[in-house]
Every structure is written in structure tokens, then in C-alpha cells.
């Protein structure tokens, strides 16, 4: 038996910096028609294409798969999504260091204005946490505390972060 794949001859690796050829669908169809007429070896020599590539094209053609590779990657992000994220972040950056219950209260208040997934993402909350506490009845004390936080934030021209808000609340108490 063979000790390694290399001894069998079925193992090939691309070299660093190697360029791969890109073929159009028209060219691939022409090669496949030529293969039907003259066989794989003569077609491979005529077009200077490895016979394995032609076999792969034929297999994909039989199974109705796409022959030309699709571009990989995430694609361009939607700018609208960035704008929405920025709008939510402007409204909630004062909440980022606060307990999660305040974040849940904020989400409840703003479900009509923003998408739930967007708010969960910006506030770094897991969906399971939201599902668990979305119907939770908060104490009146929590609601008053949230109003105080908003008040301090608004009084300081909406420029305070959570640390400054904590200091201001400590000074008031």
C-alpha cells in the first residue's frame, strides 16, 4: 500500500502565488462539445487544459451545478444598516454600561421605531435573554431609575457616557 498521498500521485498542491485561469461559460461549453466529439485527451491537448478540469466540468454539467465559481465573501454591507445602527447607538450609548434590565426596557419602548435584531446587536444582548425577559414586569423603582439616568444624560447635552452618568447620579444621591 501507499504510505502517503503523494506516492499515489493523487495529491497536488497549488504553489504560493500561483495564478488560476478563469474561463467563461461560452468557452467551457465549447470545450465540453469538443470533448463529446473527440474525447477527453485530444480536447485537453487542443485547449491546453488539464483533463481533470474537463472531467470536473462534465460532472458539474451532468448534475446541473454551476460551473463558474461564485465570488466568495460577504459582499458589501448595506449603508442603510450602518445609518440605522448609528441612530440606535446615539440613543443608547448612555445605556452601554448599565444593567441588562435597562436595555430590555429600552428595547420595549423602541420596538416600533427599530428592528429588534438591530437593537439586540447594538446593545450586545443575546436573543435568549430578550426572550426570557421581554414580558417581565419591572419594579417602579427600575423605571424611576431609568428616568433619572435619561434626565442626567439630557441635562449634559447628551455628551455623557455611562461613567460620567454614574458619577453624576452618585453626586445627586
Image (cartoon, helix red, strand yellow):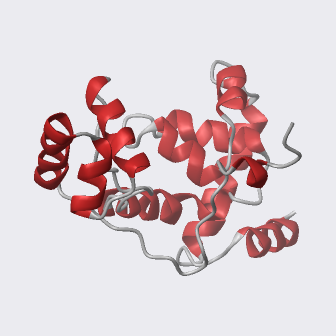
Residue 44: x %, y % from top left? 30, 54
Badge count: 0
Viewer-proximal residue among 26 and 108? 26
Image quadrant in which you'd find residue 133: top right
Viewer-proximal residue among 165 and 141? 165
Residue 73: x %, y % from top left? 45, 57
| The N terminus, quarter of image | top right
| The C terminus, quarter of image | bottom right
Classify 12 as above or below 131: below
Q: In this view, does 57 lie to the left or right of 99?
A: left
Q: Residue at x 44, y 35 (%)?
A: 111
Q: Residue at x 40, y 43 (%)?
A: 114
Q: Residue at x 63, y 58 (%)?
A: 12
Residue 106: x %, y % from top left? 58, 43
**Residue 137 shows up from this direction:** no
**Residue 96 shows up from this direction:** yes
Image quadrant in which you'd find residue 113: top left
Q: Which residue is drawn at 87% across and 67% down?
A: 170
Classify 157 as above or below 6: below
Viewer-proximal residue among 82 and 61? 61
Classify 43 as above or below 82: above
Q: In this view, does 151 lie to the left or right of 22?
A: right
Residue 31: x %, y % from top left? 18, 48
Amino acid at each position: 500500500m501507499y504510505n502517503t498521498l503523494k506516492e499515489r500521485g493523487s495529491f497536488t498542491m497549488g504553489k504560493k502565488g500561483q495564478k488560476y485561469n478563469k474561463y467563461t461559460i461560452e468557452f467551457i461549453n465549447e470545450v465540453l462539445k469538443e470533448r463529446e466529439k473527440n474525447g477527453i485527451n485530444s480536447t485537453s491537448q487542443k485547449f491546453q487544459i488539464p483533463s481533470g478540469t474537463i472531467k470536473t466540468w462534465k460532472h458539474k454539467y451532468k448534475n446541473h451545478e454551476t460551473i463558474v465559481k461564485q465570488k466568495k465573501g460577504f459582499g458589501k454591507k448595506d449603508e442603510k444598516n450602518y445609518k440605522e445602527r448609528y441612530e440606535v447607538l446615539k440613543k443608547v450609548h448612555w445605556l452601554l454600561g448599565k444593567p441588562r434590565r435597562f436595555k430590555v426596557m429600552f428595547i420595549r419602548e423602541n420596538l416600533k421605531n427599530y428592528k429588534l435584531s438591530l437593537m439586540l446587536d447594538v446593545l450586545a444582548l443575546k436573543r435568549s435573554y430578550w426572550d426570557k425577559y421581554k414580558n417581565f414586569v419591572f419594579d417602579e423603582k427600575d423605571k424611576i431609575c431609568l428616568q433619572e439616568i435619561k434626565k442626567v444624560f439630557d441635562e449634559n447635552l447628551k455628551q455623557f457616557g455611562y461613567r460620567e452618568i454614574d458619577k453624576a447620579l452618585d453626586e445627586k444621591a
